Image: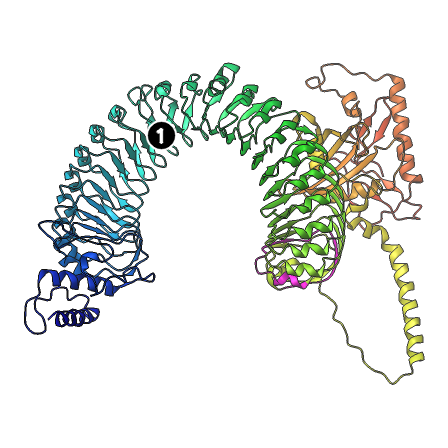
Amino acid sequence: MAAGFIFLCFTLSLFMLHCGHCHVIPQTSTGGNLTAVQMQTLALLSFKSMVSDPAGLLFSWNSSSHQCKWRGVGCGRRRHRDRVVALSLNSLGLSGGMSPSLGNLSYLRVLDLGGNSLTGHIPPDLGRLRRLRLLNLTANSLQGDIPVTLGRCTSLMKLLLASNHLRGEIPGEIGALGNLVILSIDGNDLSGNIPPSLGNLTSLVIMSLANNSLSGTIPASFGDLSSLQQLLLWLNHLSGHIPPSLGRLSNLFTLDLETNNLTGPIPPAIWNLSSLVIFAVNVNQLSGRVHQDAFNKLPHLQVFSLMENLFHGHLPSSLVNATNLVEFEAAYNSFTGTVPPNIGRLQSLQWLVLAFNSLEAKSPADWGFMRALTNCSQLQNLELRYNKLSGSLPSVVSNLSSTTLTFLSLGNNEISGQIPEEIGNLVSLQDLELHNNSLTGNIPSSVSMIRDLTVLRLDNNSLGGPVPTTIGNLTQLNTLALAMNDLSGIIPSTVGSLVSLLQLDLSSNYFTGAIPSSLFNITTLAISLDISNNLLEGPIPPGIGNLQNLAEFHAMSNQLKGKIPITLAKCKLLQILQLQNNSFTGNIPSPLSELKGLEILDLSSNNFSGQIPKFLGDFTTLYHLNLSFNNFDGQVPTAGVFANATEISVLGNTKLCGGIQDLHLPPCFLHIPNIRHKLPVLAIVILLVATIICIVSLLLLFFFACHKKRARETLPSAVMRGCHVVSYQQLAHATDGFSTANLLGEGSYGSVYRGNLCDPTGGEDNVVAVKVLKLQTPGALKSFAAECEAMRNLRHRNLVKIITACSSIDFSGNDFKAIVFDFMPNGSLEEWLHPNMNNQPEERHLSLVQRVSILCDVAHALDYLHFNAAAPVVHCDLKPSNVLLDDDMVAHVGDFGLARILAEGCSSFQPSTSSMGFRGTIGYAPPG
């Protein structure tokens, strides 16, 4: 009989493999009724047949042992012996679907299948388990709806369905589970409104509906959940106001409503929940003020977060009454006023996040909160960036907790003064951000004592002096930002010791010397290396090839020279390469064809030559290519980026041809293939030589006739040979950003500024006059070229000396051209003859002797221009405003923007062009 029963069980189990949904089998194949024990055995075997058990943990589920001894199966002990009351298979790595036959385990109280990889739907048959108290299906991959039949499991105390892929709405039938203590269905794809019937779960202690796509409002009926201790609704799409009825939940200690679309103020009743420990409403659209006495009745509060809302007004002074507060986060709001000065009473405070507000500190008293925070011995994170803090940074900041403080952010404020030398006391800091302020002085050498520092941001201040060589001690740094300061000297070679750097920004300073080769030993650099807008010299070291993970390399606007190192091709992840405004020479190396991920390549304003490589057209990601103002020649490719004129620039390369039509370049001459002739070789050679001699003779005659015309049509890049070339950044710094306070005068084609130009040789600074061309004015560019051409070979004591010229682009990428002259302290003759009493409070008078002397000076200048210069020059705009006076009242003629150079050898002053026309100021025609 026993063997027959076992055979019958195996037969039925094999049948169940093919009929998983036939969960009610009232009779055997012989017609006899199954016992309850046989029914639950078949239900368990059906479950096993539908799951995959790669670890073999259900091996004991066979006929050799009683089902009550199978792994994870629990049976009753007294009244219901041999009845399965628990199935606990948590985290066994099971996969597959859930058998509906589990609904036949009518005595089941615990069904725990959490932490597996089960798929498919939750069987509605589980609704027959009237004795079920725990249903745990958390952390699986179940799909479909929550069965409404679960509302029949009236004995359920814990319904745990979190972290699956369930969808649809929450069944209102769940509200019938009056014994439910925990409802956890967070981390799914549930949608629709929250059923108000959930307010009937008066035994509920924990409700977690977070991390779904629920919408609508929070039901006011939740105020009836008198036993509720945790209400977790974060990361949904809930809208409307926070129900005031939640103020009745006297046992609530966690209220988390963050990341929704809630609006309106925080109900005053919330501030009466004295049991609250965690209150989080961050990332909503809540508004209004936080009551000044809000924290008087929250003695147990530890976490308070209302970041990213629309709150305004002052921070409540009652904040210090929440003496157990650990985290206070109010960033991304519109709070004003000062930080409460007695905040130091919060001695358990670890996080104080007040960034992105409008908090102020104008006087030393307003900075009193910083001294108070030194009493918070557990402080870890202090964020005050993007506020309106001003005045000097108090040295007491160095007395904050040296053992716990890891994050200090005061960036994007209006803080002045120096960085306290004692800042190195904060030895536990990992992130120090003081960027975008007005800090002055040197970088304290004590910074190198903060050995755990990973982020150091001091960029966009007015820090000066050299970078401390001890900065190489910060070997944990992954971000070092020192850009946009007044730092000078060489880049210390010890920077190469920062072996963990991901990003290094030294741009827009006054660093000199060569790029240290040790910089390229930082093989971790992956985000960016920026040394642009400095005074660096020499070539790019070949060691740059070590930075194989580098994405961006910025070295524009320096004084670098030499060729592009072919080792740059090893940086195969490079996306941005900017070398413009330097003095690089040579070809674009062919190995750079390996940089297939380039998106931006700017080589403009250098001295590159040769042909533009065709491989640049093969870069599928390249969308910005600037090769302008170089010496490239030959045909411009047409494939890839070259097919779009808005994505490339080849201006200022006079030897280029071809390309797409929108570039407006001349066509290229076709190569004619060699043809074999039967003429003797000697005859061919003689014929070719004679032809070449004739052509060269004609070209020489043509060259001398047109030399002057061509000179005027070329760009003035070589006007000041031997002179130091200045960049846009140097001129902007010399004139305080072309400040109106330094404006000397304006004309039709340009504005003149007083500037203090640094001497590159290390001597004293020069006071200069900088004429900035108004390139948007028609004729301004022609005036610039004319003035540079006219002054190129002119040398006379009564002519304004041109020091140098600048042809570059400004910080916005616009063309920029300027000429730098000697500064004339006594202004123009116009100001002495016709003084403006509004701008010149002191009267000016010229004696007769001075007037005669000035006339003689001007006469000497004109005599030199007309008869003694390399080629005769006619000024065409001589007037008192263009006669400038130096310290000794010696006159100097300037402004040659309208000058004409006459053809050489013409004794009758014939113009070098066919048409002269009237030139000069409107209403005034100069002689000649």
Across and down, in percent, residue 94 comes to 30, 59
Q: Nearer the viewer, residue 532 or 281?
A: 281
Residue 140 lies, in percent from the top left, at 30, 54
Q: Secondary structure at mark 1?
A: strand
Where the N terminus falls, by quadrant? Answer: bottom left
Task: Reply yes or no: does residue 63 show up in magenta.
Answer: no
Q: Position of residue 535 (x, y in %)?
A: 73, 38
Q: Is residue 268 left or right of residue 404?
A: left
For badge 1, the amino acid type reads Val
Q: Which residue is mark 1?
A: 303
Asked where in the image residue 666 lies, by quadrant, the reply is bottom right
Residue furthest left in the image: 32
Q: How is the image coloured?
A: rainbow
Q: Is residue 619 magenta?
A: yes
Task: Quadrant for residue 795, please give it.
Answer: top right
Q: Which region of the structure is painted magenta?
A: 614-638
Please report the residue visible at 27 percent of the width from the left and 45 percent of the height from the top.
214
Residue under the image location 82 percent in, 50 percent down:
711
Horizontal relation, residue 304 to residue 88: left or right:
right
Q: Nearer the viewer, residue 899 or 134?
A: 134
Asked whether 600 or 319 is in front, the reply is: 319
